[in-house]
Amino acid sequence: MHEWALAEAVVMSVLRIAKEKGLKEVKEVVIKIGELQQIDIEIFKFALSELKSERNLENVEFKLETIEAEMMCRKCGYRWKFKDESLSEDVKEAIHFIPEVAHTFMRCQKCGSPDFEIISGRGVWIESISGVT
Ligand SMILES: [Zn+2]
C-alpha cells in the first residue's frame, strides 16, 4: 500500500540521517505533507508507529504538518493558494487524486492563463530530525 511504502521510506531515511548526524537516539521527526498529496494520514500514522517499534525508534515522536498548495502563473507571475479557489468538492477530490488535472479546472486569478505551476503542496519530505548525540 502507498502509505506503508511511504512510511517505510521515511523510517529508512530517519535511520540514515540519524547515523550521518551521529545521533544516539532520535527524539523528534517533523514530516511535511503537501496538501495535494494523495495520502491517508491515519494509515500513514499507523504505519509509522508500527514500523518504528520494529526499528528501535520507539521513543520517536513523528510530527506531521500539512503544507498549503500554492500556484504560480507562468505568464504573469501571480501567486495564489489552492484553498482560495472556489471549486466544487468533486473537483477538489479529482485534483487531490491527479494534481495534473488542476490545469483543466483552474486559471490564473489575475490574467486567466491556464499555464501555471504548482509550486508547493506536493510530495512528502522530512523537514527535521532531532535527538541526542
Ligand atoms: Zn497570470
Image (cartoon, helix red, strand yellow):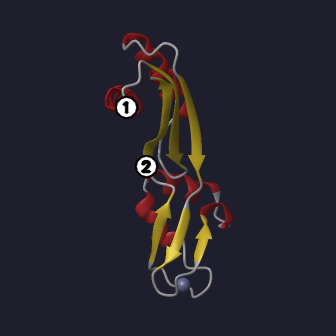
Left-right relation of 114 to 92: left
Which residue occupies 54% across, 72% down? 106
Mark 2 or mark 1, which has the lower sequence index?
1
Which residue type does callout 2 highlight?
Gly
Q: Nearer the viewer, residue 56 or 69?
A: 56
Q: Residue 40: where, in percent of width, then height?
A: 51, 35
| Left or right position of 1 against 37 | left
Measured from the top left, where is residue 114 in percent x and y? 48, 79
Pick the quarter of the image with the C terminus: top left
Q: CA distance from mark 2 to mark 1?
A: 24 Å
Tell me the crowding category of disc 1: few under 14, some 14 to 19, or many 20 or more residues within 10 angstroms, Cα based.
Answer: some
Q: Label 2 neighbourhood size at 10 Å, few (<14), some (14-19), many (20+)?
A: some
Residue at horizontal 51 percent and vertical 52 percent from the top: 36
131, 125: nearer the viewer: 131
- Number of marks in picture: 2
Dot 2 corresponds to which residue? 123
- In this rendering, is residue 2 above or below 59? below
Image: 75 above or below 1: below
- Mark 2 CB lies closer than 8 A to ligand 1: no
User: Ligand 1 shows up in which quadrant of the image?
Assistant: bottom right
What is the quadrant of residue 117 in the picture?
bottom left
Residue lying farthest to the front in this orientation: 133
Residue wearing tag 1 = 21
Amino acid type assigned to the residue bearing label 1 in the image = Lys
Where residue 62 sits: x, y (%)?
A: 54, 28
* Helix, strand or loop at mark 2: loop
Where residue 126 appears, as percent x and y from the top left, is 45, 40
